[in-house]
Amino acid sequence: MCDYPQAPVTITVYSTARRRIVTTSMAFDIKPLNLQGGQCSWCGKYGHKRPSCPLLK
C-alpha cells in the first residue's frame, strides 16, 4: 500500500453498441509495479523482458 493519500480514481467506459456509460469510482489504493529483484509485484513472475507487466495492459 502507499504511504501517502491518493484521490479516488474514476473510470468511465463508453459502449456505442448498447449506448450506455458505466462509471466506476475506485477509492482503494492500486499497488505500484515493482520489478526489483526480478519478481513482478503484480503477477509474481520473474524476468519480464520489458519494464512493464503484461497484465497491466
Image: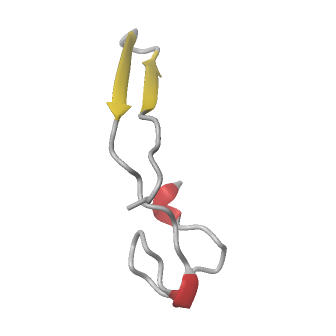
Q: Is residue 17 above or below residue 8?
A: above
Quadrant of res 48: bottom right
Using the rendered image of the protein, determine whether residue 5 is visible from the camera's viewpoint: yes
Residue that appears at 46% across and 43% down:
6
The residue positioned 47% from the left and 85% from the top of the image is: 39
The residue sitting at 55% across, 79% down in the picture is 35
> Does residue 47 show up?
no
User: Where does residue 17 sit, x and y in percent of width and height?
Assistant: 41, 15
Figure check: 24 above or below 4? above
Q: Position of residue 53 (x, y in %)?
A: 53, 67
- In the displayed structure image, the side of residue 23 where residue 57 appears, left or right: right
Instruction: From the top left corner, tell me how far across and down residue 55 is, in percent.
Output: 45, 61
* Quadrant location of the N terminus in the rendered image: bottom left
- Residue in the image at 38% along x and 50% along y: 29
Q: Position of residue 5 (x, y in %)?
A: 44, 46
The furthest residue to the top? 19
Q: Indicate whether 27 appears above or below 12.
A: below
Task: Please state which of residues 41 and 21 is positioned toward the viewer in this rendering.
Answer: 41
Foreground of the two, 21 or 38:
38
**Quadrant of the rendered image containing residue 15:** top left
